[in-house]
Image (spheres, rainbow, N blue to C red):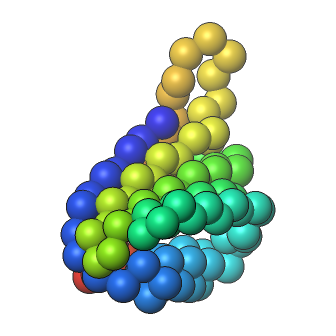
């Protein structure tokens, strides 16, 4: 499992759209699996789950993306999972790290 978190300022809808588009265009095997949106007053939360095939690991990797916003104050949490080929412990996490690097690159431009 790999994790990336970042707080920043920006437009919630624009940030979510940019992340979604970047993730899906970052790999031809990337797919949107499901998502959830919630709002309470000025606070908004969007959860997205993506999946893609990892050539390096020869398996599928998932990415959970959570974007929280209160006005223009935003917080992003991205966590990857899957991809390990071991039964009792984790080895071969290249796919997870590559998927997360894609998100990090997009987020740093926001």
Q: Name the residue rendered at 64%, 64% in the picture.
A: 37
Q: Where is residue 83 in the image (x, y as percent from the top left)?
A: 62, 41
Q: Where is residue 96 in the image (x, y as percent from the top left)?
A: 50, 48
Quarter that holds the C terminus: bottom left
Residue 65 in sight in this render: yes
> On the rendered structure, is 104 left or right of 93?
left
> On the rendered structure, is 24 left or right of 5?
right
Q: Quadrant of residue 20?
A: bottom right
Q: Name the residue rendered at 27%, 70% in the picture.
A: 73
Q: Name the residue rendered at 70%, 62% in the picture.
A: 35
Q: Which of 55 and 51 is in front in this view?
A: 51
Total numbered circles = 0
Q: Where is residue 45 in the image (x, y as percent from the top left)?
A: 52, 61
Q: In which quarter of the image is residue 63?
A: bottom right
Which residue ends up furthest to the right in the rendered image?
33
Q: Name the residue rendered at 64%, 51% in the picture.
A: 62
Q: Position of residue 53 (x, y in %)?
A: 69, 59
Which residue ends up furthest to the top in the rendered image?
88
Q: Which of 59 and 68 is in front in this view?
A: 68
Q: Which of 69 and 5 is in front in this view?
A: 69
Residue 50 in sight in this render: no
């Amino acid at each position: 499992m790999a994790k990336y978190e970042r707080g920043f300022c920006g437009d919630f809808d624009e940030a979510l759209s940019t992340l979604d588009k970047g993730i899906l265009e970052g790999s031809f095997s990337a797919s949107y699996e499901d998502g959830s949106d919630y709002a309470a007053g000025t606070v908004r939360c969007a959860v997205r789950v993506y999946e893609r095939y990892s050539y390096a690991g020869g398996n599928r990797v998932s990415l959970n993306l959570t974007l929280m916003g209160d006005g223009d104050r935003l917080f992003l949490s991205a966590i990857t999972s899957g991809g390990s080929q071991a039964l009792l412990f984790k080895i071969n996490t290249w796919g997870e790290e590559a998927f997360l690097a894609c998100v990090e690159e997009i987020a740093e431009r926001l």
